[in-house]
Amino acid sequence: MKITEKLTFLNETALTSLNTKSELEIIRKFTDAGILVLKGNFGFAWHRPDGHMHFELAYKSKRTPYTPQTPRKKGTNYKVFKSGEPLFVSNVGVEGGVRSDALSHMQSFASIPMTYQKKNYGNIVVCFFRSHTFSSEEKELCSYIGNAAAQAITIYRLHAGLKRAQKNLEKRVRERTRKLAESYTELAMDRAKDEAILTSIGEGLLATDKEGNVIFANPQAEQLLGWKKNEIIGTSLFDTQTLLDDKGQIVPIEQRPTYKTLTQGKRITTSAYSYLTKGKQIFNLSITVTPVILNNEIIGSIQVFRDISQEKEVDRVKSELISLASHQLRTPLSAINWYTEALVKEEIGPVTKDQKKYLQQIHHANQKMVELVYDFLNVSRIELGTFSTKLSTINVPELSQGILKEIAPLILQKKLKVKEFYGKRLANVEVDKKVLRLILQNLVTNAVKYTPSKGCIEIRIEFHEKNSGKGSLVISVADNGYGIPKHQQSKIFTKLFRADNAAKLDTEGSGLGLYLVKSFVDFSKGKISFTSKENEGSTFYVSLPVNVAEAVDKQIDN
């Protein structure tokens, strides 16, 4: 046979193997084809079935004079299988490569791996009774045989896998159809119940798809928004629902709770917005938006909202009352402070030891009252929107160290170790001194109060520049104290809230400190976060936008 005839024959073998019913039949066809085109005397093939790690004798030709033994790991056929390269032995007496039981049955052989795209399926072995020198043409034919056989097996396995998958799919479809048929009535009843529940709840409820288009609205939503159901179903929520911020400006779409929920997959609750109804009326709104997730994919959202205008008005009146009362209390408290201080210092006249002790207790209690009044004043100013900032250039390390000096007696009493790190360019920071002092004072005081004796506190303040003197003042206050219980961490910035362990350790706390810190940080358009583990400590992080003068100062590390 000429080379073209041999190639034509091998191509026909490859085509006919596509209609075979088993891998063994494919291997038989290519083994016989190899014997024919190489003019060998006999041949056999080793096969590794799908999912198996061992070899099986897949086929041996009729003229094979013995039964081949399973390849050993260090044997010739195993090496050919692992390497994926054919092996040609012209004289086994000289070159070796066969076992003693096969030595008397052949003088030369070609071991051809069935390999395709790094997948090995076994070896085809073509043997000769006499010595045979393999030409380059025959070697190329052997590579073609091995590759074509491997491709045919690959196609067969893919086809078999598809048939199995199709059968499984058909079975699952039948089973699913049966279950759907059985549950249709039950689902219809459940849907009727769900719609009745959603219709009867007191809050407004809107459901959207993943694009933000309204797919459900209950009667309360219609009443609150001023839109009829048929006017908003199928329309974009962002077109029909107009949210306003605290300044009366329309909230951009990307900042709205529903948009954030649909893009981030987070549940959002907020009372920071007002709603402009279809009739141009405005009311304060409390919104909770929850993502609807199916198979780890956001497919929509549920928005529950209610009118809190009356609650806001009550809060406003309370804040005004607190502000008025606090202002009225400042003068008598200041007077008590001056007089007790004068009496303790015996500026008015001598006092006894017991009298001085009682006066000091009065002075201490009065100081607590003054601090509480100032806290209430700050709270009312923020809530009424009357708080204003005054920027000035300050030296941040000096401010921080001044706060530490104020609470030095408690630090010394508890034998606390305080580490300070102040980065560069902090000597000329443009910021509201009153705001920064309150933030630092509360964070550092809390760290000192809620860290046990011989504990450690670390204060780090750095300036992160963005461009030409503008950037962020980054503060972190860490301690190895009592920490915050995990189940109460979500409430830590709530007004008047105190964690259980903190309330037991310090009965005099007001629960306003961290609320004020969070309020001032938000007012300054900064960010605040924390990490905490109970009985291991807490770290609070604050970032405030600031400007820094060009004067160069040194890094301070205490």
Image (cartoon, helix red, strand yellow):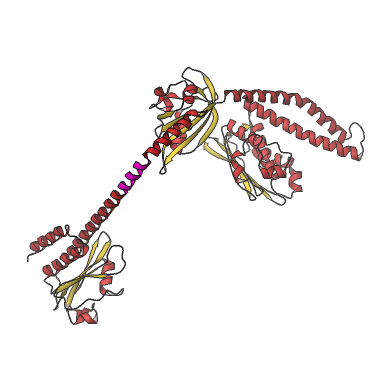
Please give the name of the residue rendered at 46% of the width and 23% of the height, measured from the top-left corner.
222
- Asked whether 101 or 340 is in front, the reply is 101
How many circles with numbers are drawn on the protein? 0
- Asked whether 543 or 446 is in front, the reply is 446
Q: Is residue 68 above or below residue 200?
A: below
Can see residue 540?
no
- Tell me if 135 is positioned left or right of 335 in this view: left
* Quadrant hosting residue 501: top right
Q: Position of residue 304 (x, y in %)?
A: 50, 31
Quarter containing the N terminus: bottom left
* Quadrant hosting residue 159: bottom left
Magenta span: predominant SS is helix
- Asked whether 281 or 131 is in front, the reply is 281
Q: Position of residue 434 (x, y in %)?
A: 66, 32
Please give the name of the residue rendered at 87% of the width and 33% of the height, measured from the top-left corner.
343
Q: Position of residue 391 (x, y in %)?
A: 62, 29
The residue at the far top in this view is 279
Q: Position of residue 278 (x, y in %)?
A: 46, 19
Can see residue 209?
yes
- Tell me if 275 is positioned left or right of 37 in this view: right
Residues in magenta, as a range: 172-183
Please give the name of the residue rendered at 71% of the width and 23% of the height, measured from the top-left corner.
324
- Tell me if 68 is positioned left or right of 63 in this view: right
Residue 98 magenta: no
